[in-house]
């Protein structure tokens, strides 16, 4: 008759023997370094993708340059300001204000751009030659458009 194998139990306190003397739950320095080298590039890619998705804030000059290139214009003024200052500049009714969910103190840029600024459909053949554009987190909106002699460049 065959004798049954002894299984480790609490009563005997014995543990099954393995070929390796140390436990595999701990990692030595070289293994940690290797895993770190594998994980770090993935973290860098994730951070870069997240930053691109969030669209990190840029300087007023950069924001205005992007808006000017979109309409083939030239930046003649770029100012760091707030959403509240742009709202006061525009003087629109409360129910028609731009970026209604943002607080007045939220950072923004005010850009003056010279170029061929088209009027709305049905506005005639003439085009304006200057626009004041407010930019918040890459969202540029025309605040006012007109002619250079009637729309001077001024800080908000």
Image (cartoon, rainbow, N blue to C red):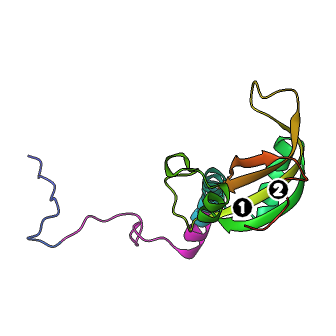
- Return the mark for residue 60: none
Nearer the observer, 137 or 22: 137
Residue 28 counted in the magenta span: yes
Q: Residue furthest front?
A: 150
Nearer the observer, 126 or 28: 126
- The span shown in magenta is 14-34
Secondary structure beneath label 1: strand
Where residue 40 appears, x then y in whole percent? 62, 62
Where residue 25 appears, x then y in whole percent? 39, 67
- Return the mark for residue 112: 2
The reply, left or right, for residue 121 in relation to residue 10 is right
What residue is disc 1 on?
109
Quadrant position of the C terminus in the picture = bottom right
- Give the quadrant of residue 86: bottom right
The reply, left or right, for residue 1 in relation to residue 76 is left
- Residue at position x 70%, y 54% from top? 134
The reply, left or right, for residue 90 in relation to residue 75 is left
Label 2 environment density (alpha carbons within 10 Å; few <14, some 14–19, many ≥20): many
């Amino acid at each position: 008759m065959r004798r049954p194998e002894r299984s480790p139990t609490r009563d005997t306190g014995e543990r099954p023997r393995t070929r390796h003397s140390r436990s595999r739950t701990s990692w030595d320095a070289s293994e940690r370094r290797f895993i770190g080298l594998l994980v770090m590039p993935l973290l860098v890619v994730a951070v870069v993708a997240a930053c691109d998705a969030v669209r990190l804030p840029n300087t007023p000059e950069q924001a205005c340059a992007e808006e000017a290139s979109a309409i083939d214009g030239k930046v003649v003024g770029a100012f760091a300001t707030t959403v509240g200052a742009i709202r006061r500049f525009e003087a629109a009714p409360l129910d028609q204000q731009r970026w209604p969910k943002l607080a007045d103190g939220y950072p923004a840029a005010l850009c003056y751009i010279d170029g061929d600024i088209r009027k709305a459909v049905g506005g005639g053949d003439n085009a304006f030659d200057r626009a004041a554009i407010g930019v918040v987190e890459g969202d540029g909106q025309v605040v006012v458009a007109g002619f250079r002699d009637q729309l001077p460049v001024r800080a908000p």
